[in-house]
Amino acid sequence: MKAVLLALLAVLVLGTGAVLVPRDAGSLQAAPSSEIARAEALSSAEALLGSASLLEGTTPGGAPAGEASGGNGISDTVMLLTRQAQALLPSSTPESNTPAASPSPGATQDRPTRAGFVSALSSSASRRLADAVNADGGMARLLAAVGTAQLLESTRLAATWGLPAPATPASESTAPTPPPSCPASTGTSTAAPTSGTAPAKADLPAALAAVVSSEQESIYAYQVALTKLDAKASATAATWLGRHQELLRGAEAQGRLHCIATPPLEAGYRLPASFAAKPALALGSMESSSLTAYADLVALSEGQTRQWAIDGLVDAAKRSQAWGAPVGPFAGLAIDNAALPPLPSPAPSR
């Protein structure tokens, strides 16, 4: 009987040139890579949230048995991971074919240690930033925002708990090689939005123009701040002034790579009214406002330009935190916490 069926199938193939497949075979297709990256990020955030909740409830100081107590700082981590997990929930759940992702190594919920948790959080950050390079635009921005926030949080917890600072992912950006020649006129406007506003157009030229303008303004602000900060803060500002000059050259190089004319340098910039009295706070606010420009560039670029934008986002977030400006759960993204969906309740144990 089996031989007869195989013979009939061969006749169908030869006669029609096609093999008949079940009606529901489409459900076996693999999920897109961006959806897989989102599911893995969600699984990791949920596992880390479980570990953070256990750390929060172990002792008044948040330390498991055998570890020193004292201020733990884990409550903010629990809130951060909760918001991230909510944002990473699928927008629609019917008949999802995304494979379940396994929790990140080290994010165990069996009596977590502080060192193990910091390591797991740092590893998750590195994975999110790596996945952002190849994800779709909007998902790339979300993954980069989540990964950056997790990286900063792992560093903060390590400092709070007296642990070694977690390793920072090495930058993979390379100097772009511009094409041999560009069109005489691209027809692209180089007008950049004013500081703190979104690009007028959601495209690569506008996003790159916003980054260039942000770096130009930052350079001006740091030059002014050098005369107003104390000796220690002034030394830090001098170092970061050099970094902003590098970033401006990098942004202009990205413009040449894509044959995009970037905005020219302006004569001066209007600084916040609080700049004279509290220059460090003003610098932190300026660094924080630049996160949006870099996050937009992540979403609207690809390849080496996106990698450069991700590195810039991480750098700006670190400087924001160092000046005392909180970054929050989503670096460079303005997400209304009230609009986030609730996390599903865990299934009751049997």
Image: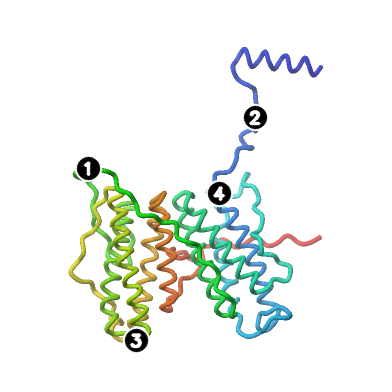
The crowd level at tag 1 (other Cα within 10 Å; few <14, some 14-19, many 20+) is: few
Mark 3 or mark 2, earlier in chain: 2
Between 130 and 2, the one lying in front of the other is: 130
Q: How many marks?
A: 4
* Percent x, y of residue 318: 44, 71
Mark 4 or mark 3, earlier in chain: 4
Quadrant of residue 68 within the rendered picture: bottom right
Please, what is the three-letter code of the amino acid marked with disc 1?
Pro
| Label 2 with label 1: CB-CB less than 8 Å | no
Per the model, the C-alpha gap separating discs 4 and 1 is 37 Å
Q: Which mark is residue 35?
A: 4
* Percent x, y of residue 301: 39, 51
Quadrant of residue 30 within the rendered picture: top right
Q: Secondary structure at mark 1?
A: loop
Q: Secondary structure at mark 4?
A: helix
Per the model, the C-alpha gap separating discs 2 and 1 is 51 Å
Please, what is the three-letter code of the amino acid marked with disc 4?
Glu
Q: Nearer the viewer, mark 2 or mark 1?
A: 1
User: Relative to 297, is 278 above or below?
Assistant: below
- Mark 1 highlights which residue? 183
Between 252 and 192, the one lying in front of the other is: 252
Per the model, the C-alpha gap separating discs 2 and 4 is 24 Å
Please, what is the three-letter code of the amino acid marked with disc 2?
Arg
Q: Which mark is residue 23?
A: 2
Q: Nearer the viewer, mark 4 or mark 3?
A: 3
- Mark 3 highlights which residue? 231
Mark 2 or mark 4, earlier in chain: 2
Q: Which mark is residue 120?
A: none
| Label 4 with label 3: CB-CB less than 8 Å | no
Q: Residue at (63%, 37%) from the top-left corner?
A: 27
